[in-house]
Image (spheres, helix red, strand yellow):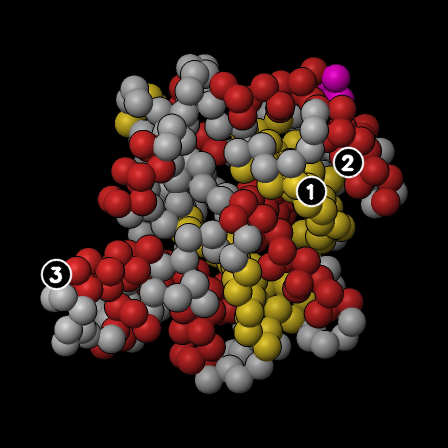
Amino acid sequence: MYIRAASNISPQNTFGNQPFLSELAEYTGDKLTCIEPDYKTLIDPKLIRRMSRIIKMGVAAGMDCLHQAGINAPDAIITGTAYGCLEDTNTFLSKMVQQNEEALAPTAFIQSTHNTISAQIALLLQCHRYNNTFVNGGASFENALLDAMMLLYEGEASNVLIGGIDEITINSHAILKRMGLYSREPVSNFELLNNTGKGTMAGEGSAFFLLSRGASGNDWAKIEGVSSFYKPRNVAEIQQHIRTFLLTQNTDINEIGLLLTGSNGDLKNVAVYEQLLQYDFDNVPVINYKALCGEYPTSSAFAMWLAAHEIKNGVCSFVSSRNQIPLKKVLIYNHYQNIHHSLILLSAC
């Protein structure tokens, strides 16, 4: 399965023809918010005013991805999101209370469902083909990716638009912070992994990919395999999952040229990665990608965009040029709150 094109709206300058992470954006506090583009160049201005922020991010990234690939309408549109359109949900519920459930405007309700983003893209393209949204917490993007793989392998589609997207809102951030997910002390994302304690920095993003069955000669990377597992008992079980996954992909650990991990600065989160790095990936260059995008359930979509970009460049941008070797395989390992764990293996075409 090949990544023909990719588009990413994130807390870094990743959208459009920007130099690849030439200047990293620093955030101080407890959250990283997306750097949003000028939507008028991608979406009809008359439609923009009816779209909430997450819908604009999703539609813009999806349409830009299709434009890069030169495809007017894909054979399938699949998205993964844990929280869906929180801003619209909050608006509708607030007005229910304020107006005593009377004379409610329907727009916020219509756009509050989790499948709104994939539906909006389909409506704009007049695409009446397969359309699906996965809402499985920290495994949402991985399940969307597996669905796309099955469609392609079974010959039900030749190309699939797939995306992972979640947003931060004032209310959701306050609730999750109260639950202890985010740091109570302000911290810089550049120092996120040096100040391990309780909590991390919130993040958000919208990453879309155009996947195809056959090579086009100008693909970003090849997806070798995807695997997810739920609530492992200990690190030994995680190690076994990783070894089994690599074995099924005919890949040795020594072939991995770069490892992307979801280490986020939270003490409990970091412990899992530290043990793995110490025993299994001691000599592999590592990027802890959540220092760039923050923590959110579908952050692995950002990681896949980053991995594909590194493979497309041919070398790792975060490793000294003196130690550079051609980048052939990249492994992504992420877990969300030590509940949903996932592995994605990408290789050069």
Q: Which residue is mark 1?
A: 229
Q: Main secondary structure of the magenta part?
A: loop
For marks 1 and 3, give the one nearer the viewer: 3
Give the secondary structure at mark 1: strand
> Measured along the vertical axis of the image, is residue 194 above or below residue 319?
above
Q: CA distance from mark 2 to mark 1?
A: 8 Å
Task: Name the residue located 65 percent from the left edge and 71 percent from the top edge.
Answer: 159
Task: Tell me where residue 273 appears, x and y as whole percent.
Answer: 62, 24
Q: Secondary structure at mark 2?
A: helix
Q: Amino acid at mark 1?
A: Phe
Of the numbered discs 2 and 1, the one sitting upstream in the chain is 1
Q: Do the residues under discs 3 and 2 have CB atoms within 8 angstroms? A: no
Q: CA distance from mark 1 to mark 3?
A: 43 Å
Residue 242 in percent (x, y) is at 76, 34
Left-right relation of 139 to 233:
left
> Magenta segment range?
279-284
Is there a contact, CB below 8 Å, between mark 2 and mark 1?
A: yes
- Residue marked by disc 2: 241
Tag of residue 98: 3
Residue 223 drawn above or below residue 273: below
Q: Residue at x 40, y 79 (%)?
A: 124
Q: Tell me the amino acid under the disc marked 2.
A: His
Q: Where is 235 relative to 179, above or below?
A: above
